[in-house]
Amino acid sequence: MRVNGKATLWANGEAFDAEPIGWSPECTFTDRPLIAVQSLGCKAADYPQESIGAVVLVGGGGCTLSQKSIAAGQAGAIGLLMYEFTQLTPSLGGLNDRHIPSARIAYRDAQRIMNHRLPLSLDVFDVYVQYKEVSSYNVTSAGMNDNASGIASLLEIAAELSRFKTNSTVKFAFWTASEPCLLGSKHWMSTVHKEELQKIRLYLDATMLGSPNGALKVYDGHGTSFGTPGPHGSGEAEATLTEGFEAQGINFTSTEISNRSDYATFFDAKIPFAGLFSGANGFKTSKEVSMFGGDADVPYDSNYHEPGDNLQNINMTILFQNTKALAHAVGVYGRSLDNFPQSAGQRYGAPTKHLYLIPALLWASHYLLS
């Protein structure tokens, strides 16, 4: 299924960039009140009386986007605008007649809207989403950074790893249908035998590793930077990936666990994970420019989900550095998982030595390791 969509947003006489949240209903609203919600918006009681007949503006976090959309609708709202720092495509998780039209805007744009004098007004809110079954995509290039860069990294590591003998089993897997709510990884998780699942000690995620204005980001497995830790063992795996950057003598930073990539399926199954990410449609900060170069207040990848995501859209330096850090982790855990934390189920079961490396699409590899 191919999903096409766009959103148009004018508020308080000013235009803002917005994107439909996946599986949102369509709408065209004009001249409606806009209500900023101070709470998480996870239940109907979070929305004030003024939400009836209005479009509500609410932050991310606290619950799923589906729960927010349903709760806002139960409170009488006709549309939902969600703002957050998190990158990657948001999704309601599937079609549901209780969802109301929902779109996402950047955190900084939400602040501009809320700093406007009251009352807030929504001039135009239009969400267009098309779900179309196609027999052939005939795509020859788009998707190089998202996520052919991750695939290139894994293929190169697999080629290099084939020359060595490992003590742990290292499995490479490739998901499809990530954009419509991580369907490939969810299907695998729902059909795999429980015994096979219990063998997995660690999942390593490689998503968008060559963003043209990118930064070297490691998921915050410890939860010390963003407050959402991964399953037991994720912090140790995060530290191993950072060692891969330290060995290169280069800067790195943390990124939030947003559960917008296929690692979410393993997170929900309480399987430790770690991963790398160089940025999507978020804006690079001045601090990140001082660490990695590039341009401040410009997206990490201006061609995210656009036809321009071609071979010229890859930052080969960042892709090279990410791949070496990932290869370091594969080398460490391929040699031994004896010191890696075990889950409760594994502590009382048979010893396991499975390491999964999994991103999402397909591309030819590049010469990355030395």
Image: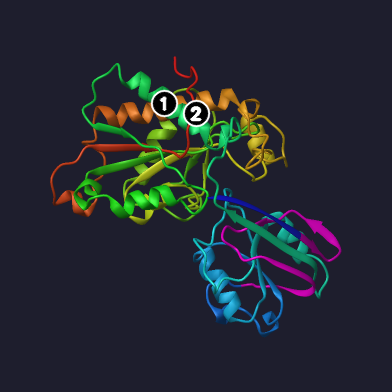
- Kindly tell me whether residue 270 is visible in this rendering: no
Where residue 366 appears, as percent x and y from the top left, is: 50, 20
- The residue carrying mark 1 is 155
Q: Secondary structure at mark 1?
A: helix
Judged left or right of residue 108, residue 193 is left
Name the residue: 69% across, 59% down: 128
Judged left or right of residue 8, residue 133 is left
Name the residue: 68% across, 57% down: 105
Judged left or right of residue 59, residue 11 is right
From the viewer's side, name the closer residue of 272 and 360: 360
Where residue 6 appears, as percent x and y from the top left, is: 69, 54
Classed neighbour count for the residue bearing mark 2: other residues with Cα under 10 Å, few (<14), some (14–19), many (≥20): some
Name which residue type carries label 1.
Answer: Leu
Name which residue type carries label 2.
Answer: Trp
Q: Is residue 178 above or below residue 322?
A: below
Classed neighbour count for the residue bearing mark 1: other residues with Cα under 10 Å, few (<14), some (14–19), many (≥20): some
| Residue lying at the far front of the rendered structure | 135
Name the residue: 78% across, 65% down: 115
Residues tagged 1 and 2 counted as in contact (Cβ below 8 A): yes
Magenta-drawn segment: 9-38
The earlier-in-sequence mark between 1 and 2 is 1
Judged left or right of residue 71, residue 14 is right
- The residue carrying mark 2 is 363
